[in-house]
Image (cartoon, rainbow, N blue to C red):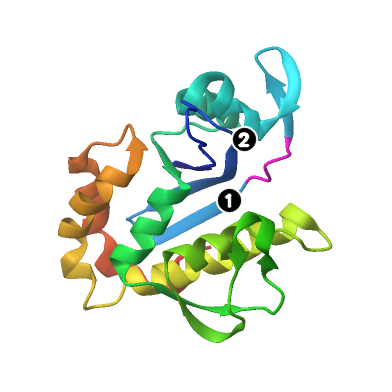
Amino acid sequence: ILVLGVDTRPGEKEARSDTMLLVSIDPKIDRAAVISIPRDTKVPIKGAGSKICHANVVGGPQYAVKVVEDLLNTDIDYYVKIDFKGFEKIVDTLGGVTVDVPPGMKKLSEGINVPAGKQQLLNGHHALGFVRFRDYPMADIERTQQQQVFIKALAAEVLQPKTIPKLPKLITQLNEYIDTNMGVTDMLKIASWAPGFTVDSIA
């Protein structure tokens, strides 16, 4: 599954992918692997060298899938595209995500000002700031590391025993906030694997 986090502005049909994650789930061994693809990775885009984040602008999520398939020499079954507002809605629908926030996650020009501290419960707005912030010495590389921290924290919320029975209902609620070629039946099938997974199942 290719997950695209896009920065869609008013009037835009497609936008650059601010975040690209390739997720592979194996229910036979109850494991999932997540690969972060830095947004500035250089790849051929429609015959011209460019950054991989431009693929979605050029040809939409289907073209982004093809570019990543070529880059990593693998087959991708599905894409899930989500914009910033959709991300905020999903986190708020889940009731927030608890994560350790390092000091200094502030960039007011982009609306980012995340409260620092251990085990902070972030609402959708602050969670978006957490995954978007990249004013680090290693910029996007360190941002992808923090995004992986967030994925683990998100999994901890979703995989709670009290949440798992609610997943079918949550999926139907959250489906309106994403663009995907995955049918609801497939989403529910993947959700049915959740009881076998823990946070440690994710690499």
Residue for point 25% across, 56% down: 191
Determine whether the residue tagged by mark 2 lies in a helix, strand or loop: helix
The answer to whether mark 2 and mark 1 are in CB contact below 8 A is yes
Identify the residue at the far top of this view.
47
Q: Nearer the viewer, residue 163 or 97?
A: 97
Q: Which residue type does callout 2 highlight?
A: Leu
Image quarter of the N terminus: top left
Q: Is label 1 in a helix, a strand or a loop?
A: strand
**Residue 38 falls within the magenta-colored stretch:** yes
Magenta segment includes 131? no
Quick check: 2 left or right of 181? Answer: right
Up the image or down, 19 lies above or below 199; here it is: above
**Label located before the other in sequence (2 or 1):** 1
Give the image quarter of residue 42: top right
Q: Position of residue 67 (x, y in %)?
A: 59, 26
Residue 4 x, y percent position in the rendering: 50, 41
Image point 51% across, 85% down: which residue? Answer: 119
Asked if one can make out residue 115 in the rendered structure from this viewpoint, the answer is: yes
According to the image, label 2 marks what residue? 72
* Residue lying furthest right: 137
Disc 1 residue crowd, few under 14, some 14–19, many 20+, Cα 10 Å: some
Numbered label tally:
2
Report the magenta stretch's main SS. loop
Residue 110 point in image, percent of width and height: 64, 55
Q: Is residue 103 left or right of residue 13?
A: right
Report which residue position mark 1 lands on.
Answer: 35
Please give the range of residues in magenta.
37-41
Question: Is 109 situated above or below 184?
Answer: below
